Image (cartoon, grey):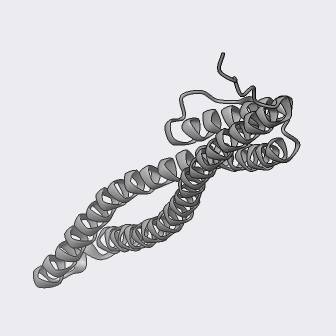
Amino acid sequence: MADIDVPDYEELAERARDRFGRRVALVTALYAVLLAITSLGGNNAGKEMMLSQQQASNTWAYYQSKVMREHTYRIEALKTKALLAERGESMTSRARQEYDGLLALAEKESARFALEKKEIEAQAKQLEAARDVAMRKDPYFDFAEAFLQIAIVLSSIAILSNSLAVFGISAASAACGTLLMINGYTLLFALPFLG
């Protein structure tokens, strides 16, 4: 009969631990990739939020300048109407024509600025809506990053301690982080404590 070489139990246990460690290390690398994707989404949401806010502020300032010009022309039209009512009968026809022309111009310009103001207001509200969406996304990315960082730390501890239980907690943390990251991109659901 041929000799059968039976491996030592400790040697088999060591190989199993090495296999566990390699697999957990690969999963940890996946966690790191997910963390990078989450960080990218969070940075983009933050930039989009700031840019939209800045653009909305600029647009509202432009809106305000249109309002001021509209009111200036409206006041000029009212003054001209009052002047015509007071002195209209005593004016020469040429002077009357000039004041009528000024009145028509002031009313036309006032109406133009009122129309432009409405277009600018719609644009500013769109920018504010984009800012609000980015603001709703941002906390999901923040919490996702935290969960994924915790998952990476716990996964490293699982490798060092060869603990399947710690790795399970790490996987649960990574699952939460991944779900929050996906929601940060899509806003499929809203968590009340994240606004």
Q: What residue is rendered at 32% in x and 55% in y?
A: 119
User: Where does residue 189 sit, x and y in percent of width and height?
Assistant: 59, 27
Quarter of the picture holding the C terminus = top right
Q: Is residue 116 left or right of residue 149?
A: left
Position of 163 relative to 74 (above/below): above
- Between 186 and 23, which is closer to the camera in this rendering? 23
Position of 123 relative to 101 (above/below): above
Q: Residue furthest top?
A: 1
Q: Residue furthest front?
A: 1
Q: Is residue 21 left or right of residue 107?
A: right
Q: In which quarter of the view is residue 123 placed?
A: bottom left
Position of 147 relative to 8 (above/below): below
Q: What residue is rendered at 72% in x and 33% in y?
A: 171
- Between 98 and 192, which is closer to the camera in this rendering? 192
User: Where does residue 52 sit, x and y in percent of width and height?
Assistant: 49, 61
Q: What residue is rendered at 17% in x and 81% in y?
A: 98
Q: Is residue 42 left or right of residue 74?
A: right
- Between 93 and 179, which is closer to the camera in this rendering? 179
User: Where does residue 159 sit, x and y in percent of width and height?
Assistant: 79, 44
User: Where does residue 172 sit, x and y in percent of width and height?
Assistant: 74, 30
- Between 87 and 163, which is closer to the camera in this rendering? 163
Q: What residue is rendered at 50% in x and 36% in y?
A: 186
Quarter of the picture holding the N terminus = top right
Q: In which quarter of the view is residue 93 placed?
A: bottom left
